[in-house]
Amino acid sequence: MAREVRGHRSRSVSASGRIRTPSKCLAFFLLVLSSSVGLRPLVPTTMIGRGTAHQSRHSHSRRVAPAPSRPTSDSVSETRRAASAEGDDNGGAPPPLCVGSRRHVLTGAVVAGALWRGEGAAASIPPRGAIGEPVVSGGPLPLTVGLGTGPPYAQRYVELAIDAGYRLFDTAQEYGSEEGIGNALKAAFVSGKLKRQDVFVTTKVEIDNMGYEPTIKSVRESLDSLGRLEGGIDLVLIHWPCPFVRKDEPGAIAKYSKLRRKTWEALERLQQDGVVKQIGVSNFGKRHLKELLGYAKVRPVVDQVEVHPYNQRRDLEKLVTSEGIRFEAYSPLGKGYIGLFEDPVLIAIADAKKKSVAAVVLRWLLQRGITPIPLSRNEKRLKENLDVFDFALTEEEMRAIAKLERGQFVLTDDEQLA
């Protein structure tokens, strides 16, 4: 059983247990920070616990393009419908992780969250999380398996996912699943099944709601739909950098650059007002992301894009990693219809590990430092998709999957958007 996460506590700093000098205060602060966010301790420590995580499988079903697609302005409705829905996945509930005390976890989340927000973020790149790290509301996007909820995704499916062990939920204004998630979470909070601090909810600003005032209005409505989550929505993303317009259309880049900037300024204001805790982007290619980083007062904490073995996004990964932005993968199983489940390389690895192909793909993403959010409405698959924390892929197996790259998009090549 792989042990992924470690917790630490300090040795006594004095016979009385008190810290009497500024230097000791600083040492203690560094210890709590390092232990709570999973870094190598900065002062001597005594390990008090280790956690093991447990995994799963996935599958997605939806319409696909067999080769990299090229967006056109007259294919908006079809592409957006495809972008809204996901196929089926597989999942299971991870056992609780021991990472020091709850105070350590929350302290680390608060400090790490501060690094992800506001000024100074450019100089302070937060550490990448440990696989299977606990979900903490307002903390960095956890490196675990989340749940995608493309339409239709009813409340009963969210309840199944909660029972299976999911604590990271992804939705969007366009999906129509915000209310179902809000109702399911509210019921879980009231019953005592969940605590707000153990849940992380992401939603996204729909294309039609881009712009300053529309974004402000729509995100406040999302907060209402999600049950007015205590402390605000954990993460709000710009869903797409623009409508599905090619970058080579005359004047398109200049036009939509302005729209993106107004939308981002609105998200910054919403974070300042406490409506949202963190902000980020989705489907932003390298050009879109570099443009945003040039003017953002609050840096994006996440870029969520399509990533799977046939579309690995290595160049974009280098950029987001260098900027301290966490990487999140939708359609991690290619929505179940691009042939991943029949791929001989993936099948051979799955057989060797006695796991499903879905579990192998999700584990591959996690070991790259990418948070996958597969979608499933099937109770068995929901559990299977969490069955990824008790094994690891070897370097040879990781290299074998890396060779499967073919640049194949299920939805739209975001690098081609204006």
Image (cartoon, helix red, strand yellow):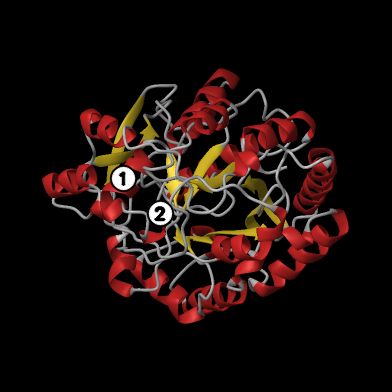
The quadrant in which residue 407 appears is top left
Q: Is residue 54 visible?
A: no
**85 in relation to 389, above or below:** below
Structural distance between the alpha carbons of marks 2 and 1 = 15 Å
Q: Is residue 318 visible?
A: yes
Q: Which mark is residue 69?
A: none
Q: Position of residue 37 (x, y in %)?
A: 47, 37
- Could you classify mark 2 by the number of other residues whose Cα lies within 10 Å: few (under 14), some (14-19), or many (20 or more)? many
- Please tell me whether mark 1 sits on a helix, a strand or a loop: helix
Q: Position of residue 307 (x, y in %)?
A: 45, 45
**52 in relation to 312, above or below:** below
**375 in relation to 274, above or below:** below
Q: How many marks?
A: 2
- Please tell me whether mark 2 sits on a helix, a strand or a loop: helix
Q: Position of residue 229 (x, y in %)?
A: 64, 67
Q: Which residue is tagged 1?
A: 363
- Could you classify mark 1 by the number of other residues whose Cα lies within 10 Å: few (under 14), some (14-19), or many (20 or more)? many
Q: Which amino acid type is marked by label 2?
A: Gly
| In this picture, residue 377 sits left or right of residue 25 | left
| In this picture, residue 278 sits left or right of residue 21 | right
| In this picture, residue 173 sits left or right of residue 355 | right
| In this picture, residue 199 sits left or right of residue 380 | right
Quadrant where the N terminus is found in the figure: top left
Query: What residue is shown at x 57% (from left), y 50% (from top)?
Result: 412
Choose between 76 and 61: the one closer to the eye.
Answer: 76
Q: Report the residue that reaches farthest toward the top.
A: 23
Q: Which residue is tagged 2?
A: 334
- Label 2 or label 1, whichever lies nearer to me, is 2
Choose between 150 and 63: the one closer to the eye.
Answer: 63
Query: What residue is shown at x 73% (from left), y 42% (from top)?
Result: 418
Query: What residue is shown at x 48% (from left), y 75% (from top)?
Result: 188
